[in-house]
Image (cartoon, grey):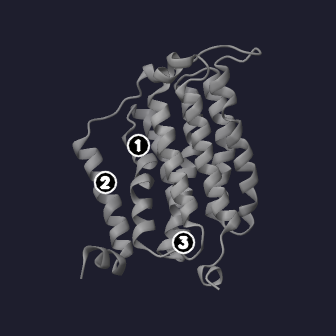
Amino acid sequence: MTLAGTIRSRPLVFLFGLAAVSLLGLFLLVPPIPQSQIYHGFADQRRMLGIPNFWNVVSNLPFVLVGALGLRFFRRDLSAGLFFLGVFLTGFSSSYYHWRPDDAGLFWDRLPMSIAFMAILANVVEERIDARVGRLLLWPLVALGIVSLLVWLRTDDLRLYAWVQFFPCLVLPLLFWLFAPKHSGTWYWFAAAGWYLLAKILEYADEVIYVTGHVMAGHALKHLAAAGACYAILRAFQTRQPVAAAAT
């Protein structure tokens, strides 16, 4: 049996094993990651219309719009509803943080994002591996996301939060590759991955983009790209059909 076949035959062993190995590796091999205060020094700090850091603040509005459109999924899919609630609240919490960047504001910025990361992981487990397990994992994963931020505040160590943010980025492509979908619209998820990758590139190129044209910096563009990823996921939920029905 191939490695892929072995994983498909024991999907939960694969999922929990990968989670355990990645967590152990992170805490055994990586030293504590403090929050750099340089992080708060974004390239574009212009005040417009009385709003400090104008573009970094207002570029969060698409999160509010996308999240609001997705809140109706609470009625049929709790994990999806929690994901879009996290997106919706991110629009406000990120605006609050960017109005006056500091660690206290950054906690509130990251809180709804951590809920969204964990909720979408539970949703994909429910969709691709086991519906019951996905539902059971939802609240423990959300709690872990919140705990990761409390650990950061208490110890100034971002390792657990880094896992909360990046473990879904590692495992979700594997789940999409290895396990068949129950619904159509998989390509929207790959579009979301592309938008999210672009968002991370823009975030790291914040100053380079700003000095190139002095129109908008990379961090504000990152918000727009990340909102694009959320919109792609919204379209996946809006348009999806059971695979059997989609094939007829």
Q: Secondary structure at mark 2?
A: helix
State which tag comes first along the sequence, 1 or 2: 2
Residue 229 image offset from top left, x and y in percent? 58, 49
State which tag comes first along the sequence, 3 or 1: 3
Name the residue rendered at 55%, 34% in the picture.
107
Vertical position of residue 99 compared to residue 60: above or below? above
Q: Secondary structure at mark 1?
A: helix
**Quarter of the image where the N terminus is located:** bottom left
Residue that mark 2 sits on? 22
Residue 171 image offset from top left, x and y in percent? 40, 59
Name the residue rendered at 26%, 74% in the picture.
3
- Does the rendering let one see residue 142? no
Q: Are marks 1 and 2 in contact (CB under 8 Å)?
A: no
Label 3 to label 1: alpha-carbon separation: 24 Å
Closer mark to the observer between disc 2 and disc 3: 3
Vertical position of residue 141 compared to residue 95: above or below? below
Residue that mark 1 sits on? 162
Label 1 to label 2: alpha-carbon separation: 11 Å
Choose between 165 and 170: the one closer to the eye: 170
Choose between 24 and 186: the one closer to the eye: 186
Residue 149 image offset from top left, x and y in percent? 49, 40
Q: Secondary structure at mark 3?
A: helix
In this picture, residue 134 sits left or right of residue 55: left
